[in-house]
Amino acid sequence: MNGINTWSFSPYRPFLKDVGDLSVCRVAPTKSTVAFSWLPLEEAVEYTVLYRKRGEEAFLTWGSTSQTDCEITGLACDTDYEFYVTCGEKRSRVRLARCGEGIGSTVNYLHPEDEAYAFSGRYLCSPSLLKHPDGYLLASMDVYAANHPQNLTFIFRSDDGGKRWYYLSELMPCFWGKLFLHRGEVYMLACSTEYGDLLISKSTDGGRSFLPPVTLLRGSNGKNGGEGVHKNPQNIVIKNGRLYNTLEWGSWANKEYCHAAMVMSFDLEDDPLNPASWSFSEPRRFDHFSEELKELPLRTMTIEGTLVIDPEGKLLDIMRFGKYGQAIVYEVDEKNPHAPLSYERLMDFPANLSKFMIKYDEATGRYFSIATRLYDPEKPKARNLLSLMVSKDLVTWEVAYDLYDFRDRDHKLVGLQYVDFEFDGEDLIYLCRTALNGANTYHNSNYVTFHRIEKFRSKLEK
């Protein structure tokens, strides 16, 4: 065989692993159906779909089709089903899905006991949403699990505003990725794995394929507790001719400082695929910057910062922070992109124990966040209340309205988290890492779901 010089696969197939002759590339269960898609075989004329209730002896034939998708109907809610597709002697591996009441529209689903992607992980994470000026939407997500390689990312596309989604490609290795647009081209900024290398590449065909990735920073991998790049899909900010994004350096296993805050940027006139174009701020460890921080250990969580320009024009990095109900705010030195961030203040923010994103809306002059709201100090890890929050000044935050309230469900098993959102005319659209209907835990999500809040501004209090 020849060597491989690519980042894109359709699909990625590990050597010496039975991944099936046909590849089921998307699964989307509902209360009584399981819809799924597979990649075509060049010589195929007809495919046959088989299924059974999990654990039953015989597979039943659902039917045959010349298409590459199928929806099995008439299934029982809260029940696991196994299914696969054949074409002559060729067949896919058996996949799993649990029927149950979902939310939004499902971009993709992965049953926690489905072994299809165990070479990377078992759960869906890191939703990233991109609204392309040509009218379509792109969504990406990775596959993760503790003590797994965590290095596979899926990309999906919608041409009807998020109602229906279809598979585009896979990136390998790719983790914690963010899709963004620069000069009309789609880019992916990601890590190779947890605490691995920082990578970037671009697609010239709308996400169907990507150029071989360029390494911007080297990480240590982190599987043995070593430090490396930590990031999450966060909003891109452009200010004074530079493009900015956030990252951190460290690891959860680091006993000294955990994670140190950083910002990366490049001049818009430069080539982002040239590592020399990028500047990285010196990592800023948490310290006792002010009297109100003296009580906190130096190994305090500062991760997953979101960039935003405040009413005074300062570029701020507002971070998830290890103090209940507050975020830590750093200021970016725009004159020296290599300088460390400087501590500005704490900000009351009742959604700080999960990743959040903040964006400024020019139409209202307000800042918005869709985040997992804190509601009970006795349940600090609960992520089963998702809210739209609003601020006029990045000081005081109010709940505009709740989007999903599952406080009547077990907070250890239900989670709505890590939202990436965009303004879309009068609407607000977002992707959510969703744990529901038999998820492994609230944290280990089995869905990535898409949502649209129509005319979201009209529902705000004046």
Image (spheres, grey):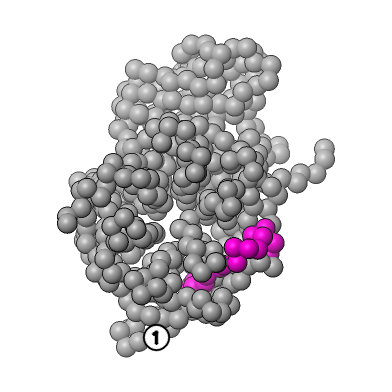
The C terminus: image quadrant: bottom left
Find residue 1 and report its horizontal and vertical position in percent.
82, 37
Is 160 or 22 nearer to us in this picture?
160
Outermost residue toward the left?
462
Name the quadrant containing residue 224. bottom right
Outermost residue toward the bottom?
291
Determine the residue positioned at 29% across, 61% down. Answer: 366
| 33 in relation to 444, above or below | above
Is 461 or 62 nearer to us in this picture?
461
Is 4 or 143 nearer to us in this picture?
4
Identity of the amino acid at label 1? Phe
Q: Please indicate, yes or no, whether residue 250 appears anywhere in the rendered image.
A: no
| Residue 311 is covered by the magenta coloring | no
Is 65 placed left or right of 417 in the picture?
right
Determine the residue positioned at 59% across, 52% down. Answer: 183
| 89 in relation to 351, above or below | above
Please give the residue where the numbered disc 1 appears in the rendered image.
289
| Residue 259 is covered by the magenta coloring | yes
Q: Magenta region: which residues?
A: 258-275
